[in-house]
Image (cartoon, grey):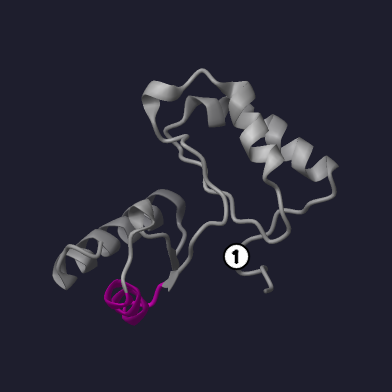
Amino acid sequence: MPSIGLEEIKKEVMDLHTTIYDKYGYEMKYIRPPKGEYSERTVAYTKSLGYITTMWSFAYMDWDENKQGREDYAKKMILDNLHNGEVILLHGNSKDNANILDYIIKEIKSQGYEFKSLDEYKK
């Protein structure tokens, strides 16, 4: 987002907002900058549009569709990096994530962690 103009940012964000609302009935209020790329300008502008910029504290190379079929690797990466307050970034295009998500959620809970929405998160 740092390399595009404010009108293009607004169009992309509002198009996403509309899609999310139409599909899920959810009013979007958080935004994660694509690729984690942001600037003071883009954060300030998306804030002026009513959004809170949210980042992640853990990610791994799950977005690369050429690097799928590594479910054991994905489990290890996720479970070996758990920490309190973690915001896990998992990409929806990852077949590995889809295949292990149930296992991962159960395992994380069995270790005593809870899942909370960003609204519930306390720093």
Residue 2, picture quadrant: bottom left
Determine the residue positioned at 55% across, 21% down: 70
Instruction: Tell me: residue 77, above or below residue 57.
Output: above
Residue 57, picture quadrant: bottom right
- Name the secondary structure under disc 1: loop
Residue 49 lies in the magenta stretch: yes
Determine the residue positioned at 33% across, 73% down: 46
The amino acid sitting under disc 1 is: Leu
Q: Quadrant of the N terminus?
A: bottom left
Residue 23 at what x, y percent from top left?
40, 49
Residue bearing the label numbered 1 = 118
Determine the residue positioned at 36% across, 60% down: 33
Determine the residue positioned at 33% across, 65% down: 38
Q: Residues within 10 Å of mark 1 (few under 14, many from 20)?
A: few
Furthest residue in direction top, as rendered: 69
Q: On the picture, is 106 further left or further right than 65?
A: right
Residue 73 at what x, y percent from top left?
60, 26
Q: Quadrant of the C terminus?
A: bottom right
Q: On the picture, is 79 further left or further right than 47?
A: right
Range of residues picked out in magenta:
40-51
Decide which of 22, 41 is in the foreground and name it.
Answer: 41
Residue 51 at what x, y percent from top left?
40, 73
Residue 2 lies in the magenta stretch: no
Image label count = 1
Q: Main secondary structure of the magenta part?
A: helix
Instruction: Tell me: residue 23, above or below residue 97.
Output: below
Q: On the picture, is 52 further left or further right than 22?
A: right
